[in-house]
């Protein structure tokens, strides 16, 4: 049984939510925090009061979900599954701040109601009137991958379904301040367009939502495989896992037309990608995506959207290429992303 | 894909006991866990009764074999997950392909609250050690790492139905031959964030809660963790003792009615119970006992009653809400009640519903009010319904 991407939608710091050529222009940002380009959410959320109460992360999720449903040409999915590491940070921050400052008195329920991690999936279901399976995975750098694995397993059990699945995370002022204190982001002035050549420590923070409609009826792009590796003991274990993953699909590294890596401009982390591509994929063209969307735990959802677009459109825009020349035929793309050295994920996409 | 998935053991820590046998003892002696707040630092102490785990973090840390400075959510999780594993008699965990699927809603919020008080004074203040495990997934990883679980780790957060969904995902991982064993359930510590959140919704009872009673006026919060050990048919043959029961059916649906309230007719609840029954190939009359979601709020119990009526009338199984003892443990409740329900099948237990006196107008069925064991319960259902419309039902069967 094959699983296909039948629709996809993406809200990101790039022009991905609007009609137009695929990443023809890379939007340039200064500073270590990329913010999504908000589409006009009114087109998907008709009630103004409802929209006013919704956090940004919820709106991003709804936008990407609606775009993917439109793209697939369906209105009602058979399941809604979301991956989000941080959940609804803005409303969590508001409720927490008021609770502490007001010494646990005179609190409004709205931010609490909107703060639960399942708000995105729940609000999509509410908007669609969808009574089907609804779940939310909240596992750091595996949040999107767990949601994807759940979708794949559900389709194997019952092929006649169309599953809406996505990944979403937001940055807030509080989260950016606190994560910056952990030393994750660059201290010096930085531009996203030269991020990957910086050679210094740290990356840039990102956010966004990417959703997909998956099903077993033929679409343009096939989701061939997914694997995750938790806290590998060595670089050798990662290499073996990649070779093992490809072997499961009766492929070798030479069969990959384009390798998309999670390179994020953090010199220490990027060395591991360089080493790996030199040993396993010496002849393969590579692309990157975190200079477009920034680093966040569910950034691999953006990577899958980008990889699927490349296959569907049969072109890899100049702004995404990192090394080598993309071949004329882009039949098979491997995405290898790792998050903070602990969460490693492989996604294999093929032209249908 | 339809390979049977068995329950090989379980563990619980909650307001009525630090182990599963202690919890069963509390049920049999009719000793609910609600008391005045003792361990949580909150201005609401003395106002709202809660079912706290009766131990401070240092004591729990010693029991868990973990550092005392980490989130209480992780300490509770480790204690229950370890009890669950040990109860199977499978020995060294490292020799198997094991997954740890844990649900929670608060993550390390108990520590984040302390951090935030300092941080709001100045952005450079507050110990980072207190927020490093803020994320829900971080709590799961602390426990997975402590137990040596690497094959699959995942965290689910669907509010009050979280723990039940962990069992569904775990069962799928086994049926898809990704792992052979899954420790699945949930954990949540009591926090000021949730206590104040539920208070703003005005659904906390200032008295001990009265689920499915006509005089009910809200829920009591609790805390704890509960996990079952799901095993494949192959592993079942290696078990030193017979499995407790089989996870024969499950379904997850969305009420799609309101962000926090249940629909008046409980459509999501109905669809979840119906879906779980259909998957198990059973008829409503086959269910001998339902462990209710039964929070004790006007709205929740009324919707659940309506949905049960639609599916089961006129012949109702025995029903009860164990939240009348444990309080509502949020992300842990689906896990804790899955353990209670699985044990109910194995030992024929019908749990009592504490403080029930007056049947509800909407659904005049009296829940069980006394503890009994040795009943013949071939099939037991466990309901977990949550915020954002998340509804889940599980069915456990003897064979």
Image (cartoon, helix red, strand yellow):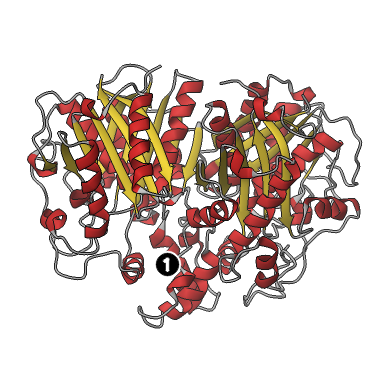
Where is A352 relative to B212, above or below?
A: above
**In the image, what residue occupies the spot 78% across and 23% down?**
B286
- Where in the figure is residue B375, as x and y percent of width and height? 90, 34
**Visible residue check, residue A124:** no
Is residue A265 left or right of B67 when viewed as pictured?
Answer: left
Residue B235, quarter of picture: top right
Q: Is residue A138 above or below residue A174?
A: above
Residue drawn at (57%, 26%), measured in percent from left and top? B175
Outermost residue toward the bottom in this view: B121
Q: Looking at the image, can residue B53 be seen?
A: yes
Q: Residue at x 49, y 37 (%)?
A: A134
For the residue pair B256 and A24, the one nearer the viewer reads as: A24
**Rendered residue at 66%/61% (across/down):** B64
Q: Secondary structure at mark 1?
A: helix
Rate crowding at label 1 as few (under 14), some (14 to 19) or many (20 or more) other CA atoms within 10 Å.
Answer: some
Q: Please give the residue where the numbered disc 1 appears in the rendered image.
A: A94
Image spot of residue B237 (x, y percent): 72, 27
Identify the image quadrant of the N terminus of chain B: top right
Residue B11 in picture, x, y percent from top left: 72, 48
In this rendering, position of residue A187 left or right of residue B45: left
Q: Chain of mark 1?
A: A
- Front residue (pair B267, B97): B97
């Amino acid at each position: 049984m094959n699983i296909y991407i039948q629709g996809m939608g993406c809200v990101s710091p790039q022009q991905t939510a609007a009609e137009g050529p695929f990443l023809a222009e890379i939007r340039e940002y200064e500073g270590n925090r990329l913010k999504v380009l908000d589409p006009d959410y009114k087109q998907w959320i008709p009630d103004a009061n409802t929209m006013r109460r919704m956090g940004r992360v919820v709106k991003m999720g709804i936008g990407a979900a609606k775009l993917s449903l439109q793209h697939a040409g369906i209105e009602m999915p058979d399941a809604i599954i979301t991956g989000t590491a941080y959940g609804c940070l803005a409303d969590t921050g508001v409720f927490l701040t008021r609770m502490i400052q007001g010494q646990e008195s005179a609190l409004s329920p709205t931010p609490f109601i909107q703060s639960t991690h399942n708000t995105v999936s729940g609000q999509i279901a509410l908007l669609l009137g969808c009574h089907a399976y609804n779940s939310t995975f909240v596992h750091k750098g595996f949040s999107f991958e767990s949601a994807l694995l759940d979708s794949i397993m559900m389709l194997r059990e019952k092929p006649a379904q169309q599953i809406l699945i996505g990944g979403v995370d937001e940055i807030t002022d509080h989260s950016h301040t606190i994560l910056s204190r952990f030393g994750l982001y660059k201290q010096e002035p930085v531009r996203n367009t030269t991020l990957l050549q910086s050679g210094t420590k740290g990356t840039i923070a990102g956010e966004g939502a990417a959703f997909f409609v998956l099903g077993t009826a033929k679409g343009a792009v096939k989701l061939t495989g997914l694997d995750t590796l938790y806290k590998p003991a060595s670089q050798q274990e990662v290499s073996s896992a990649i070779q093992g993953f490809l072997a499961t699909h009766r492929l070798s590294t030479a069969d990959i037309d384009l390798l998309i890596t999670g390179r994020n401009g953090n010199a220490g982390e990027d060395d591991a990608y360089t080493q790996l591509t030199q040993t396993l994929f010496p002849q393969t063209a590579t692309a990157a995506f975190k200079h477009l969307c920034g680093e966040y735990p569910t950034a691999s959802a953006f990577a899958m959207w980008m990889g699927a677009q490349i296959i569907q459109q049969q072109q890899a825009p100049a702004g995404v290429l990192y090394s080598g020349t993309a071949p004329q035929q882009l039949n098979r793309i491997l995405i290898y992303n790792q998050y903070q050295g602990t969460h490693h994920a492989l996604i294999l996409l093929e032209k249908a | 894909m339809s390979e049977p998935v068995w329950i090989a053991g379980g563990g619980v820590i909650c307001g009525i006991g630090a182990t599963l046998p202690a919890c069963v003892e509390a049920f049999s002696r009719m000793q609910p866990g609600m008391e005045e707040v003792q361990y949580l630092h909150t201005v609401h102490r003395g106002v709202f009764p809660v079912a706290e785990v009766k131990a401070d973090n240092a004591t729990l840390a010693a029991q868990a074999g973990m550092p005392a400075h980490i989130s209480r959510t992780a300490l509770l999780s480790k204690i229950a997950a370890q009890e669950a594993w040990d109860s199977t008699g499978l020995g060294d965990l490292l020799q198997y392909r094991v997954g740890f699927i844990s649900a929670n809603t608060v993550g390390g919020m108990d520590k984040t609250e302390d951090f935030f008080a300092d941080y709001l004074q100045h952005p450079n203040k507050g110990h980072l050690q207190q927020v490093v495990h803020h994320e829900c997934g971080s709590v799961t990883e602390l426990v997975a790492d402590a137990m040596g679980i690497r094959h699959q780790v995942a965290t689910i957060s669907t509010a009050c139905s979280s723990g039940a969904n962990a069992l569904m995902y775990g069962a799928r991982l086994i049926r898809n031959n990704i792992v052979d064993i899954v420790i699945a359930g949930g954990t949540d510590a009591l926090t000021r964030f949730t206590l104040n959140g539920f208070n703003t919704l005005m659904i906390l009872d200032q008295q001990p809660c009265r689920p499915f009673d006509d005089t009910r006026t809200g829920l009591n919060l609790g805390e704890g963790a509960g996990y079952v050990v799901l095993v494949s048919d192959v592993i079942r043959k290696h078990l030193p003792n017979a499995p407790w029961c089989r996870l024969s059916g499950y379904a997850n649906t969305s009420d799609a009615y309101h962000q926090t309230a249940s629909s008046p007719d409980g459509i999501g609840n109905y669809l979840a119970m119906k879906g779980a029954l259909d998957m198990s190939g059973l008829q409503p009359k086959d269910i001998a006992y339902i462990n209710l979601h039964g929070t004790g709020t006007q709205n929740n119990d009324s919707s659940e009653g309506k949905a049960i009526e639609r599916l089961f009338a006129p012949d109702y199984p025995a029903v009860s809400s164990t939240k009348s003892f444990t309080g509502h443990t949020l992300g842990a409740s689906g896990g804790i009640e899955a353990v209670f329900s699985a044990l109910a099948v194995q030992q024929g237990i019908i749990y009592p519903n504490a403080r029930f006196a007056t049947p509800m107008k909407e659904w005049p069925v009296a829940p069980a009010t006394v503890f009994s064991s040795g009943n013949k319960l071939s099939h037991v259902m466990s309901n977990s319904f949550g915020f954002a419309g998340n509804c889940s039902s599980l069915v456990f069967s003897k064979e």
